């Protein structure tokens, strides 16, 4: 991730919050935002993991926002958390479905990383979003009946990735590093090693 902008993340979260009621009552997992942002820097689709990701960064890195934005950011995060609590069952249903789709994509990438490691290195910073979303969804679903099974699937992917893993510097914009410590987010501190044995 390059050129991180906390102000952009806050704008994304505000847009997502604006569509939350329609989103949470629908069967859609990847929701096209009504306000999808400026032409040259579009906002991502609204998903449960996407909202969690925005909130995680904004909550832990408030100093990256202008002081005038702090109160608005805190209020927006609080409102989203209240909505998540109020619609817990719907949010968890969406999270389970989103998890399944993101796990398929991540598993495919990890399998390919063992065969095409040079390409995996080039694209890893972008692909690591997928693993981050899985982490956030697992955390949300920690009390859900499916949690153990979902966590086991991620662990299987992690085992495959670790077999071709080379520790390295933080893969995203350095401004974000304080929000993602290496002891928890190890998968953001390295790349698939092009010289490692194939899986």
Image (cartoon, grey):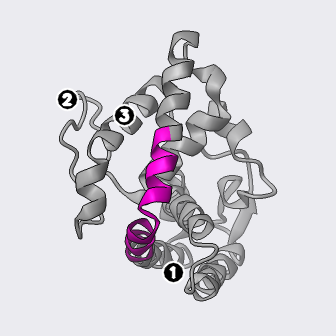
Q: CA distance from mark 3 to mark 1?
A: 36 Å
| Disc 3 crowd, CA 10 A, few/some/many (<14, 14-19, 20+) | some
The residue carrying mark 2 is: 39
The residue labelled by disc 1 is 111
**Foreground: disc 3 or disc 1:** 3
Q: Secondary structure at mark 1?
A: helix
Res 184 label: none
In magenta stretch: residue 57: no
Quote the CA–CA distance across marks 2 and 3: 17 Å
Instruction: Identify the residue under disc 3.
Output: 14
Crowd tier of the residue under label 1, counting other residues whose Cα lies within 10 Å: few below 14, some 14–19, many 20 or above: some
Q: Which residues are magenta?
A: 79-98
Which residue appears at 49% of the width and 78% of the height? Answer: 107
Measuring 57% from the left and 60% from the top, which residue is drawn there? 136
In terms of image quadrants, where is residue 121? bottom right
In the foreground, 154 or 15 = 15
Seen at 29% across and 31% down, the residue is: 41
* Circle 2 SS class: loop
């Amino acid at each position: 991730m390059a050129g991180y902008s906390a102000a952009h993340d806050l704008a994304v979260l505000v847009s997502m919050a604006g569509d939350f009621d329609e989103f949470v009552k629908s069967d859609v997992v990847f929701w096209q935002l009504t306000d999808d942002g400026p032409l040259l820097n579009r906002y991502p689709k609204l998903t449960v993991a996407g909202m969690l990701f925005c909130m995680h960064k904004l909550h832990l890195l408030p100093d990256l926002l202008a002081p005038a934005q702090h109160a608005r950011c805190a209020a927006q995060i609080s409102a989203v958390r209240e909505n998540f609590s109020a619609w817990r069952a719907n949010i968890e249903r969406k999270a389970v479905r989103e998890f399944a789709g993101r796990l398929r994509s991540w598993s495919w990438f990890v399998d390919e990383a063992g065969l095409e490691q040079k390409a995996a290195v080039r694209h890893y910073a972008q692909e690591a979003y997928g693993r981050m979303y899985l982490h956030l969804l697992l955390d949300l679903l920690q009390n859900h009946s499916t949690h153990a099974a979902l966590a086991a699937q991620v662990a299987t992917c992690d085992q495959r990735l670790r077999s071709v893993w080379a520790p390295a510097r933080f893969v995203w914009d350095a401004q974000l590093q304080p929000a993602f410590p290496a002891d928890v987010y190890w998968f953001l501190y390295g790349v698939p090693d092009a010289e490692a044995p194939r899986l």
